[in-house]
Image (cartoon, grey):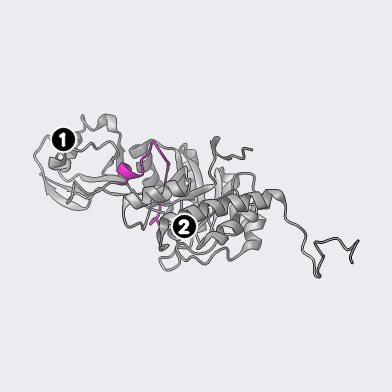
Amino acid sequence: MTDPLIIAGKSYNSRLIVGTGKYQTYQQNADAARAAGAEIVTVALRRVNLSDPNEERLTDFVKPDEFTYLPNTAGCYTADEAVRTLRLAREAGGWNLVKLEVLADQKTLYPNMPETLEAAKALIADGFEVMVYCSDDPVYAKMLEDAGCCAIMPLGSLIGSGLGIMNPVNIRLIVEQTRVPVIVDAGVGTASDAAIAMELGCDGVLMNTAIAAAKDPIRMANAMKHAVIAGRDSYLAGRMPKKTYADPSSPLAGLI
Amino acid sequence: MLITVNGVSREVDPGLTLAMLVLQLAGESGRDQRGIAIERNLEIVPKSEHASTVIEDGDKIEVVQFVGGG
């Protein structure tokens, strides 16, 4: 039974996208990404450390021939910075599929939606396939979809907070109105959060800290893999209706 | 002549190309630099032009690569 996730015309078996930040080592990072069964990993673009040319490199551990790199714009606070960063990422790796995030505020890392929309339009006009980190506002989500983004990625809660899916009603509204994949990005803290996102009908989940900051990141990566699969199956299976009173599971007929 | 590489001032010889600068930066490590991208005065210089692009006095150069991120 195949149930691929299709983003920008490309098919993926895994619905779990993982980040590559905050791990103790790049080796642990690679092990966790494999344990998560992830096919796509987010990466950041930063200055080469000129003072230490022998510094370990992400690309030697989490290899671009094993994982699809999804360059992000973490740390960008304007549309111009984000566009500049992703053009450099395209030059560095040759990939058109990118994760756009334009932040508003250092304390919350909440997305700046007007800047995000402006950057999305500029990137799409420049040939990028844009997966976009956004607020859980269905109105802006629709604008981003109409602008041509290939995946809508609302936050479950603040980046790195681990608070879970704080506004399931809005996430569900976005799922119902959106024709491209909806991927909850940020806020997942534990496996049940990932399952809840999938049970809401999301097409995937993107997480970093929930795995990297777990006491045992490899085991948590495995837990997240199963949670996403379980949540997806549960959504597709269609849950039973809720009832106010009990309904016995054993037959009433033939009672002694 | 004086240029700026990744925000740090650096004295280089006239005639230096971007490709030669990248080799200098790799130092003794000799590791390949395929995963980098270069911006010169806010304009991306494609890899195919690194060898033919001569650095000029006062150039501001950024050399970037992928690192872990969420």
In the rendered image of this protein, does residue A245 appear above or below residue A115?
A: below
- Secondary structure of the residue carrying numbered label 1: helix
Residue A89 horizontal/vertical position (percent): 36, 42
Q: What's under tag 1, amino acid-wise?
A: Met
Locate the N terminus of chain A by quadrant: top right
- Viewer-closest of B32 and A125: B32
In the rendered image of this protein, does residue A223 appear above or below residue A246?
A: above
Residue A134 lies left or right of residue A90; in this view the side is right
Q: Which residue is mark 2?
A: A220
Q: Which residue is mark 1?
A: B20
Image depth: mark 2 or mark 1 in front? 2
For the question of whether residue A94 can be seen, the reply is yes
Region rendered in magenta: A58-77
Q: Residue furthest bottom?
A: A245
Q: Residue sitting at 71 percent across and 49 percent down?
A: A237
Q: What's under tag 2, amino acid-wise?
A: Met
Residue A82 horizontal/vertical position (percent): 41, 50
Specify the subunit that label 1 lies on. Answer: B
